[in-house]
Image (cartoon, rainbow, N blue to C red):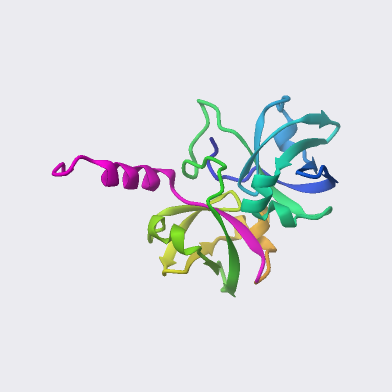
Amino acid sequence: MFTGIVEELGTVAGIEDQGDAVRLTISATTVLSDAELGASIAVNGCCLTVATLGSGEWTADVMLETLKRTSLHAVSVGDQVNLERAVTPTTRLGGHIVQGHVDGVGRIVSREPSEHWEVVTISLPPELARYVVEKGSIAVDGISLTVVSVTEDSFTVSLIPETLARTSLGFRAVGDEVNLETDIIAKHVEKLVLTSPEGVRS
């Protein structure tokens, strides 16, 4: 589990094509301070497992299913990626509950800078729209953000200078793909409501 608070921007140092998978090598510092083999690190919101550890870098194997369902299929050597270690029982939950299980991919539709923040519009796959509400939480490339407004096919977020400076959303361009993870609580509530015995009301 993660919180959507990005700890650092890592750099893709290598991509090894393994046919039905890809091995990513990522340069990092902060997330490696206590990393172990088998540990979970979110990369642009995708929960990946540490396969090898080296001096200032680590590798993860990305399966074909993950490549199909996330924006990791488009990363290149030199790209910067958002990194976050899995939470511990004593971690402050500064964002919201994030699993690192990407629900879909959106695209940056527009960016509107102002003096102190920037409003970013992101396309929303239709099947995810019911889980996104105004003032609710959503993870975009692993970043916990508050939804400002939402339509059937897009939503907006307001980015403060800290988010722009410390995450990949500071340099994502219009048209770029981003990973989206909706609120897990909303999905559980929906299932409970749909499968409740007839006549039962909360």
Report the front residue among 95 and 202: 202
What's drawn in magenta, residue-wise?
175-202
Q: Position of residue 191 (x, y in %)?
A: 33, 44
Residue 43 lies, in percent from the top left, at: 67, 45
Side of 133 relative to 124 (left or right): left
Residue found 23% across the figure and 41% down from its top: 196
The residue at 67%/28% (across/down) is 39
Depth order, front residue of 54/75: 75
Please tell me which residue is depicted at 13% across the width and 44% down the height of the picture. 199
Q: Quadrant of residue 160?
A: bottom right
Outermost residue toward the left in this view: 199
Indicate whether residue 190 is drawn in magenta: yes
Q: Residue at x 43, y 64 (%)?
A: 148
Residue 151: x and y in percent read 41, 69
Above or below, 172 relative to 50: below
Q: In the picture shown, does residue 182 fall above or below 173?
A: above
Q: Quadrant of the C terminus?
A: top left
Whether residue 57 is situated above or below residue 164 in the rendered picture: above
Task: Check if residue 100 falls in the magenta segment.
Answer: no
Quadrant hosting residue 71: bottom right
